Amino acid sequence: MIAQEQKPMEEILGYLDGKQKVVVMGCGGCATFYHTGDKKAVNEMAEKLTKEGKEVFKIVLPFSFQACDIDKSGIWLEKNRKEIENRDAVLLMSCGDGVQIVADYIDEKMGIPKSVIPANDALGLVGGGPTKFKETCQSCGMCELGKTAGICPLTACGKGLMNGPCGGVRVGNKCEIDEEKDCAWVKIYERMEKLGELDKFIEMRDPHEWSKAKRPRLFEIENPVNIMTAGIGALPGFIRLVIGPKPKLEEEGKGE
Amino acid sequence: MGEKMGDEVYSDLMRELKEGKYVFTGELEPEKAGDVNEPIEMARELVGLVVACNVTDNPQSFAYVNSMAASYLIQKETGMECVYQLRCSDRNRMALLSDVLGAGALGLKNILALAGDHVSLGDTPDAKPVFDLDSTTLIAMIRKMVDEGKDLGGNEIHNPPKLHVGGAAAPGAAHLKAEVAKVKRKINVGVEYLQTQVVYYTDVLDKFFNELGKVDVPILVGIFPARTFGQANFFHENVAGVDVPPDYLEAMRKTKEIKDKEKRKEEVDRVNIEFFTGFLEHLKGTPAAGCHMMAVGYPRIIAPLKKVME
Ligand code: SF4
Ligand code: SF4
């Protein structure tokens, strides 16, 4: 998921300077998960802006309807065309992905160009939970995890080194840059030690192939997941997860 | 096709190391200035005392005069051979490659290949950190350029640079085994000598040499006689993997109380000589090939310390 936090109000108000009528739009994806674009966040933002004298119209996207998934968010945009048309700006409470996809859509598809302003700062692709998360991958396009015992050298190492550790590891094996964080390369060493792969640790890994991340990267799939099948298909799994018994691990050898 | 490692000697530093001479090197720090007058003055005082001087490249990520330019000017003005420090923090592989070619063209003979501190630690913290290569891949790239006359893409280099590449080691690293494994990796890819981060404790050094075992590359051990309490304290507080002993720090702190400038200088020298004599005596019994004296702005201390090693 894409972690995010709301920008300081001061910054947001700066972008909205001179823009009186504002649409505040949320996101039912990551931004709902991180409470930066759910219904509550949209309502609170609308309240603050109203206090600042703005005239606000709210668009809340239901859970799992992401701003960046234009197939779905487009439905809400079209439904509210009139309101958008009459406003000076759209404040989008999603990551930068959602902001850009929506901005493109209302400009190029709906033909009503508006400033679409980000309310949030995206903080990276994170994993973990339920309350603590860490950035684990930067979608570099050429995964190195097979060479580093499953720990990303580009993301988990503060310097993104392919051959660490650097000389700056702190007491307690913390990172040179931030003593709150563990040194990724000490972790890689320790995991490789457990796996009996220290010979691989000593081997030099070639410089990363950044050519695999020529930006912006474009991507296409043949069979897009459609709203109905995805929604209904996911339901039984979701119910089982909430009320059902814990899944049992398959016994060894079974099912072969 | 160039010669394989060990066959060619391009610098005085490498010659002395190969001859098995006990080697002393110094350190010069270009500043935030439009000239390199001060390091040139320092270099003049060190000529004859050390075989070569490191010229720092944006140390601790403070942006100073470009280290290649400084190395060239120092060498030209004073005849002091320079070790051009080159960090990966600020340059991508293309820039590093062209800098190595530039260094060769300017007649620089030694490069110390470093990852470098993260830019957020210095005085330009919003800079984009690069680290496109790391110290190991930089060493490998330089060896390929010098020995095979090829760049990273395998493209032919016309008249390849003739220079040596050294690397760093951190005996005081928090995780010594991982550090030593990395050092061995640098040795495997052809580093020609190693220069350690500053060490103050003999047992730290002994543990490092023990863990490393016998290796074929010469190792210079770094010491840091500080010119002022402030310098020593900065090191203590800001440099990871280096513990400055409290009694030394305290003795240095006390020198601040001496009002008379000359007397204070004498006391600083006395504290340093007293502290480092023991360390240097110990160094004689280790596999170290020499000593890198990181006495930045403090050339007068080199001669008395060298004397200990005679
Ligand atoms: S190497 Fe790191 S950034 Fe690249 S894909 Fe793998 S986990 Fe992601
Ligand atoms: S301390 Fe470890 S994680 Fe931090 S920059 Fe150095 S090698 Fe990377």
Image: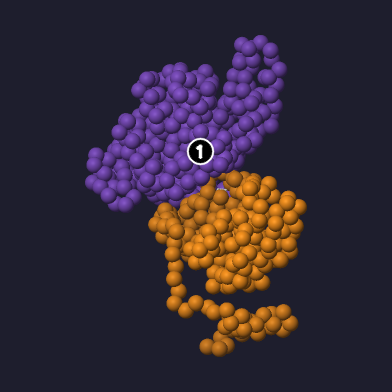
Q: Residue B63, image x and y in percent?
A: 51, 33
Give the answer, above or below, for where A138 lies relative to B156: below
Give the answer, above or below, for where B156 lies relative to A191: above
Secondary element under disc 1, as helix, strand or loop, is: strand
Q: Residue B267, image x and y in percent?
A: 64, 17
Seen at 73% across and 62% down, the residue is A43
Identify the subunit bearing mark 1. B
Left or right side of B42 for B151: left
Left or right side of A176 for B259: right
The amino acid at mark 1 is Thr
Confirm whether residue B169 shows in the render.
no
Give the answer, above or below, for where A55 lies relative to B233: below
Q: Residue A99, image x and y in percent?
A: 57, 60
Mark 1 crowd level (few <14, some 14–19, many ≥20, 10 Å Cα): many
Q: Residue B12, image x and y in percent?
A: 35, 29
Q: Colour of chain B?
A: purple
Q: Colour of chain A?
A: orange
Confirm whether residue A74 shows in the render.
yes
Left or right side of B185 for A168: right
| Location of residue A46 by image quarter | bottom right
Residue occupied by mark 1 = B196
Left or right side of B107 for A255: right
